[in-house]
Structure formats: C-alpha cells, structure tokens
Image: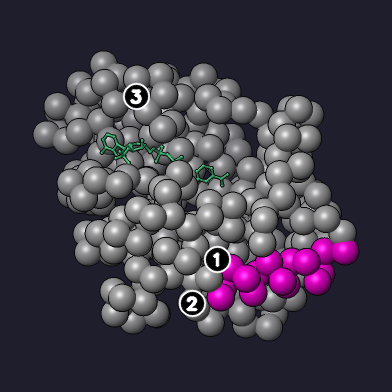
C-alpha cells in the first residue's frame, strides 16, 4: 500500500477503511472482511459507538499490531480538558483493546479546543499515540491552532469529494505541514455520484467503476481516503485503484465538478455548532 509521510515522520497508508454508520453489531464482521481485503488503516471514533467491535476484529485477525494504522477520535470535551481528554483517550484505547494509537483526532473544532489539544500533545509526548490531528477544521481555525501550539496537527480530516474538492485548503495545509484526509470521499452517494455521467465516462475509459475513479482521483491528489462499505465486493473494488492513472485532461474535467460547498453542513453554522456541542457521549 502506498503511504504518505506525516510531519513527524510517521508513515500512513493513503487508503483505508472508515466505519462511520456501521452499526456496532455489523462492525466486527465488516472490519474482519476489510482486513482480509488488504486494508490496514482503520478509521473509527468514540462517537461512532463501534470501537469495541473494531477492537475485536483487530484481535481476531492476528495481524501484527505494527502492520496496522488505527485512528480514533475525541468527541467534544468541556473544560477542564486535561483530565477529560485523557479519560476519553484511555476509554477509546480500552475499547479498541490496544496499548497505543497511530492517530488521535479531535473530532470537531468545538469546546475547549486548546485545552484538548494540549492534552493530546501530552499523550503524544508520553508515547501513547504516534500522531495527533484534527477533523473538520476550516483554514482560520487550523492556522490559529498551528500558530499557538507546540505540535502542528499531522492530519486534518475534512469532507472532500468531487463536488467539494478543497484544493486551496489542501495547498494551505501543505504549507503548514498538515496532511489532508478525506471523509465522505463518495459524498455518501449524494448528487448521484455513483452514476455521474462524467465520472462514469472516465471509468469506462479505464475499465474502472465510478468509485474507483473517485478514489484514484483522491490518491493522485495526495489526499488520504477512507471509503466505507459493508459489502466485501465493494471493499475489494475500493482498494483496487493502484493499477491505473487518470490523465491530465481527466483531472481537469473532474476539477470542473467542484461546487466549493459542503453537501452535508457547514461546521461554521452556529446551529450546527450548538447541535454538535450539545451531543454528549454516554460513557
Ligand atoms: P463514503 O465513504 O463517502 O460513502 C459510503 C457510502 O458509499 C455507503 O453508502 C456505501 O454503501 C457506498 N459505497 C461504498 N463503496 C461503494 C462502491 N464501490 N460502489 C457503490 N457504493 C459504494 O461515506 P462516509 O462513510 O461518510 O465517509 C467515509 C469515512 O470517513 C467514514 O466511514 C468515517 O470513517 C469518516 N468520516 C469522518 C467524519 C468526520 O467528521 N471526521 C465524517 C464522516 C465520515 P455500502 O456500505 O452499502 O457499500
């Protein structure tokens, strides 16, 4: 698997498996099938409620720990953050059945962000997590976080797909040494992505599916991607994107699909800030 090198030298697979919206009772099997298909990067979150099932699949796979790259995410925490963040981290690690994480992300740019970040820095210094990063940070918040803290986030995981391409943000992140990671690479199928005429035509030119064209486009841009599927045939399809290359003309045509706007919601919308911040995990 092709990898990217994060700003602290850690190698991260460029393509992995996301488990958002996989119900806990289906997650162990899905992750086991993804590992069988060759995925080595797993992306979960405390908020997904399926960390224990991910952990069971890891354990029963027998794959050596050093071959896996496991990410989970810290949910929004109130002050005082140091204790809360450490507790949340240990809970996630316990549920996953691991003794360290590869990547720990702050899931939302809300709450006591600076307190949370400093607690994450201290977990990193203690060797509990190889890299720390953020998710859903727009450029202003990201640059402020970079400028006012010791450790620069290794990753910013943001909505990135053909209809919301984030190329300017990717450039800014590159300048600051932050690796872009796509969530919702297929836009969860919105805008009829899987039957989109342009993407279908490009797929036909390579004998590949629309899903493969989209993932290849992300990989060629240097964007880490984590497609989700509960179907083994799609898991195999989604990881089979390393034997063809999109041409400059095809990349230019896909660039024309960018609307510059989210297909989900804007993390800067005050209603979303309130709604997400009120959500508390039960444990
Ligand atoms: P996604 O990967 O864009 O799309 C998943 C959808 O596409 C599912 O409905 C899946 O259906 C379908 N699909 C997958 N492969 C396909 C294929 N080859 N052909 C046709 N349909 C296919 O959506 P996502 O799960 O929201 O995003 C990916 C990952 O990003 C998540 O799992 C999660 O790890 C992460 N994420 C992070 C955040 C954040 O705030 N940080 C937010 C959202 C997601 P089936 O399962 O039925 O195949």
In front here: 59 or 66? 59
Residue at which label 2 appears: 97
Residue labelled with disc 1:
103
Residue under the image location 14 percent in, 27 percent down? 204
Asked whether the residues under the numbered discs 3 and 2 touch, taking CB atoms below 8 Å apart as contact, a structural biologist would say no
N-terminal label among 3 and 2: 2
Q: Camera-side residue: 240 or 266?
A: 266
| Residue placed most toward the observer, 4 or 130 | 130
| Residue at the spot of label 3 | 193
- Is residue 205 a member of the stretch shown in magenta? no
**Mark 2 Cβ and ligand 1 under 8 Å apart:** no
Q: Does the residue labelled 3 lie within 8 Å of ligand 1?
A: no
SS assignment at label 1 = strand
Disc 1 versus disc 3: distance between alpha carbons? 29 Å
Q: What element carries label 3?
A: helix
Quick one: label 1 or label 2, which is nearer the N terminus? Answer: 2
């Amino acid at each position: 698997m092709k990898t990217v090198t994060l700003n602290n030298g850690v190698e991260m697979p460029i393509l992995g498996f996301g488990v958002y919206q996989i119900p806990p009772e289906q997650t162990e099997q899905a992750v086991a099938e993804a590992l069988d298909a060759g995925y080595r990067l797993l992306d979960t979150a405390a908020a997904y409620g399926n960390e224990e099932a991910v952990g069971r699949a890891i354990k029963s796979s027998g794959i050596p720990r050093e071959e896996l790259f496991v990410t989970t995410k810290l949910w929004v925490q109130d002050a005082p953050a140091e204790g809360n963040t450490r507790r949340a981290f240990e809970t996630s690690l316990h549920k996953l059945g691991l003794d360290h994480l590869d990547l720990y992300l702050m899931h939302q740019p809300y709450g006591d962000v600076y307190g949370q970040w400093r607690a994450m820095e201290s977990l990193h210094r203690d060797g509990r997590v190889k890299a720390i990063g953020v998710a859903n940070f727009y450029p202003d918040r990201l640059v402020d976080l970079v400028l006012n803290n010791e450790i620069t986030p290794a990753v910013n995981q943001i909505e990135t797909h053909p209809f919301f391409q984030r190329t300017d943000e990717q450039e800014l992140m590159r300048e600051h040494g932050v690796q872009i990671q796509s969530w919702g690479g297929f836009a969860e199928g919105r805008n009829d992505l899987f039957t989109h005429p342009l993407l279908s035509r490009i797929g036909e030119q390579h004998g590949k599916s629309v899903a493969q064209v989209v993932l290849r486009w992300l990989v060629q841009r240097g964007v880490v991607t984590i497609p989700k599927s509960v179907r083994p045939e799609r898991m195999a399809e989604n990881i089979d994107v390393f034997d063809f290359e999109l041409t400059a003309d095809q990349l230019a045509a896909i660039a024309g699909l960018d609307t510059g706007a989210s297909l989900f919601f804007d993390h800067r919308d005050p209603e979303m800030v309130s709604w997400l911040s009120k959500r508390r995990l039960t444990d």
